[in-house]
Structure formats: structure tokens, C-alpha cells
Image (cartoon, rainbow, N blue to C red):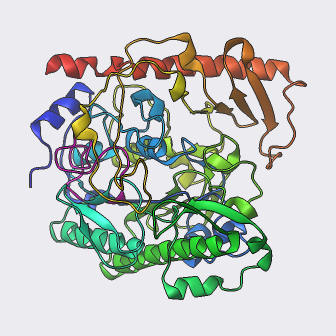
Amino acid sequence: MKLITPPLLLVLLLAGIPVTDAQAEDLPNIVLLMGDDHGWDEVGYNGHPHLKTPVLDEMAATGLRFDRFYAAHPSCSPTRGSVLTGRHPNRYGTFTPGFSFRPEEITIAQLLKTKGYVCGHFGKWHVGPVKSDSPTNPGKMGFDEWLSHDNFFELNPVLSANGAAPKKIEGESSEIIVAAASKFIAKAKRNNKPFFVVIWYGSPHEPYSGLPKDLALYDDLPEKYNDKTFRLTSNETGRPTTRPLGDILRERYAEITAMDRSIGQLREFLDAKKLRDDTLLWYCGDNGTPGDGIVTSPLRGRKSQMYDGGIRVPGVIEWPARIKTPLVSQLHSVTSDILPTLCELVGIDLPQRELDGLSLTGTFDGSLKYRPAPIFFWQYNVGKDKQREPWIPKPLQIGTTPLVKMMGNVYTRTFTNFKHPKITASDFDGSRVVLSDHYKLVVAGNDVSIKAQLFKVPDDVAEENDIATENPEVVRGMLEQLRQWQTSVLTSLTGAEYKPRLSAN
């Protein structure tokens, strides 16, 4: 099997990454799982009053539970880019959903291939089209096989296999992509190759739907929820509709339970193939819970906001061969940490470009308790950006996989990514956060109009008590750190780190 194409080999060598091969028994297998719009409180192990998530609960009870795990961004595409690259999404222009990332980025799949891994992607991609001619499809970014969707999907999903024309597959979507991933894993085992599998669910993103057996589990939700209504997408028309909140929650919870069950099916498959002990399973959400699901959360805010309700997500690792006793980590950790962690585990040098994550391997034995530097979050103010020359030609950014949700009178999505050759003063705007071991600074505005809120961490769980006025030196120091980091991010955004590769071509 051809593991590394010549262009990829050139990119990796220019990034200072040695290329070797290895057999399966030398390396752990790795599976990354991610729920879509699945916030921190929406699991049984975090005390949800209604949800049934027995598989995730068991993983949290027997493996490593990250109690303070964060998505790199309060929305999906940017966070997914952070998983793939170890970098904040603003570094490569994945500002919001609908923005692709760039072909010049180096992904964890590309890195793992240098160690002989076979790599597969299953489910939601959403950092560019999955069609064959897209320069940012899973295949171009390091995955050997994929059964994927440009965006989210429901029951009976329409998915593209390895960039081919999308086809409808009947069944529960979480179970469908786990079954496809299982076939990929079985082939890797036959070929004695270590595998890296990414399973990115379409659940529980709205519009919601569920199997009768899953819906029945939530027939008795409190009547008080139906005293409220919420606006979301209609499964019948693809247009917005207003429905009772209790009915919406019943369907949302059914999707989460089905997703949880599919993780159990994957674990059972790994058991049957005698792979489970040596396979690292890492589950997390891509952003906080949206407004129609946040009703039970103790956290402030929701999806798209910078309070913890928008960025704090479930995070749990199960790896029986390495994590033999239950652990709970209070370390602040983030999706950008996934790439550095996996690189250290398998002995891969990090790319010679700015990363925003760090290795969490010290949490596997409890030795890493404090983060040496803050985590930064930033919603780029796209509306103020006047630099609009496309990074990728527009025809290559047109998606092909249909959704239930209609936007702009179409059922597919088109992506974009812009060149940004100049750094301007307005670029520093947008909602942003500095999260240290002891404080969380939430910032809005720019220059003279900056508004900063400071919260004590971890004491103020609901982020109710702004202590910025009482701690001006803390605020000043964190603002200075933020400005330095933003300058680094904007330098990456210009494409400066790609120049060695571009000149080599």
C-alpha cells in the first residue's frame, strides 16, 4: 500500500518531520470520536437529570475523565480544524462554520502516516467539501479512506465514499458510520497495520430525529418544558419552524443516546477483534450546547458564546493498556491538545510551525496538574475583514452532500477561505478569552472600547461574579498575553509559515 504521496512527503520533510514505517504491534491504535453540538452537561456522568449515556458514563468511570475540557471555538468547523492541526483555527482562516481550512495545513492524519498508520474518516468533515476534486477533502489531508459528509446529517444519511457521488444509506446515522469504521479497522488488522480512525457524528445537531426505541426513553420528560417553544429547522421543509421545547428535547436526547449506543458497538467490535486494550478511544464535543438544549446546564452561555456553556464539552479517554485505573483531570485542556498528545505517544516530531496545544500525556498518570501557559479562544470578527480574495478557487469549494436544513434556497453548502496578506488594527477585534489556571478573562471590543470580564477559576462555575475591577493588574497582564498571542495568530493567517513549502514547489 502506498502510504505517503510525493507531495505529502515533501511537505513533511520541509516541516522537519522524519518519515518511517512501523508494524501494528509497535504502536497504539487511535480512535477519535466527536459529537456535534454536544455540550459539557449532556452526559449522565456530569449529572444530567434526564439523559441516558451508559457507555460514556462507563468510559468516564473507568478511564481518564477531563472535567475541564474545552472546544477550541464555540462552533463546529473551527474546532474540527483545531483537532486536525493542533492550531487555533484563526491561524488558517477557518473562522466560522462554512469556512474551509487550507491545503497547506499539516494534519494529524498526515503525521501518523509517517509512522505507518492507515487513516480513515467517517461522518462529518465540515472543513471543506468531501468531493474528489476538493483540495481539502479527507483524502488530500491524509486519510486513506472516508465515508463522509460536508456538514451534518440525520437518519438515513447521504454520504460520500472516498469522494464519489453521495449515496443515501438507510439506518441510524451514528450506527452507520461506526459500522463503516469497523470494516476499516478489520482491514487494518488483517494487514497488520496500526489504525487512526476519526468518527465525527452528525448527532445531536438539529434538526432532530430518532428511532422509536430511543424516543420512548424520553416520553416522560417534565411537562414544564413544553411551556416554552423554540425555533429550529423543520425535517419536512428544511425551513425554520417553531415547536414545543419538550418535544425538541425528546428528539435531541434520543440522538445522544443513539450516539452513545454506537460507541458501545464500537467497543464491542474492538473486544471481539482483541483490539480494545491497545486502542485509545478519545471522545469530546465540538462546541457547547445550543439554545434548545442548554435548559439543564449549570454553565453560563451556549453554543456560539465564549462563556463556558459555549466552549466547555465532555472529554474522556479510554485506553486499557495504558490507563489502568480511573482518573479525573481538572487540568484545563482543549481540542488543540489532541495533535501534540498523539504525536508524543507515537514518537513523532511536531511540525515546525506555531501550535496552540500541548501534550496531555502527563494526565495519563496524574503527573500533569497545571498548564504552563493559558488557553486562548477567539471568535474572529469576519464582518470587519475586507480582504476577500479566495484562497481556493470557488468551484472547488462547492459541497455536494445534501442536508435537511436549507440555506440560500439550496440543500448543500459552499465553503470559503480568504487570503489575508496584511495585518490591520481591526483584525484584533472579536470575542476572545484567556483561560489560566486561576482566572478566565472574557474580552469584547477593540482598542479604546475593550470590555473585559474576569472570573475566578474554578470557583465561579456559572461565571456570575465579575472581579475585573478588583484585579486590574491581573486583567492588564492577561490582555498583554492575549495581544501577543493574537499577533502570532495573525502572522500565521498571512500564510507566512507556508512560504518554505510554496517556494519549494
Q: How many marks?
A: 0
Does the stretch in magenta take in 86?
Answer: no
> Is 494 placed left or right of 453 in the picture?
left
Residue located 57% across and 83% down the image? 215
> Is 75 placed left or right of 388 in the picture?
right
Does the stretch in magenta take in 127?
Answer: yes
> Residue 119: percent from the left, percent from the top?
25, 55
Residue located 51% across and 63% down the image? 323
Residue closest to the eye, 427 or 271: 427
> Is 183 placed left or right of 154 in the picture?
left
Residue located 49% across and 48% down the image? 76
Magenta stretch secondary structure, dominant: loop
Q: Quadrant of the N terminus?
A: bottom left
Say if 228 sits above or below 306 in the image: below
Q: Is residue 196 visible?
A: no
> Is 468 placed left or right of 162 in the picture?
right
> Residue 412: percent from the left, percent from the top?
34, 53
Residue closest to the eye, 25 or 281: 281
Tell me the quarter of the picture where residue 26 sits.
bottom left
Q: Quadrant of the C terminus?
A: top left
> Residue 281: percent from the left, percent from the top?
44, 63
Say if 333 sits above or below 503 in the image: below
> Residue 206: percent from the left, percent from the top?
52, 62
Say if 58 sits above or below 230 in the image: below
Residue lying furthest right in this view? 470
Q: Is residue 372 visible?
A: yes
Q: Which residues are magenta?
A: 121-146
Residue located 27% across and 17% down the image? 499
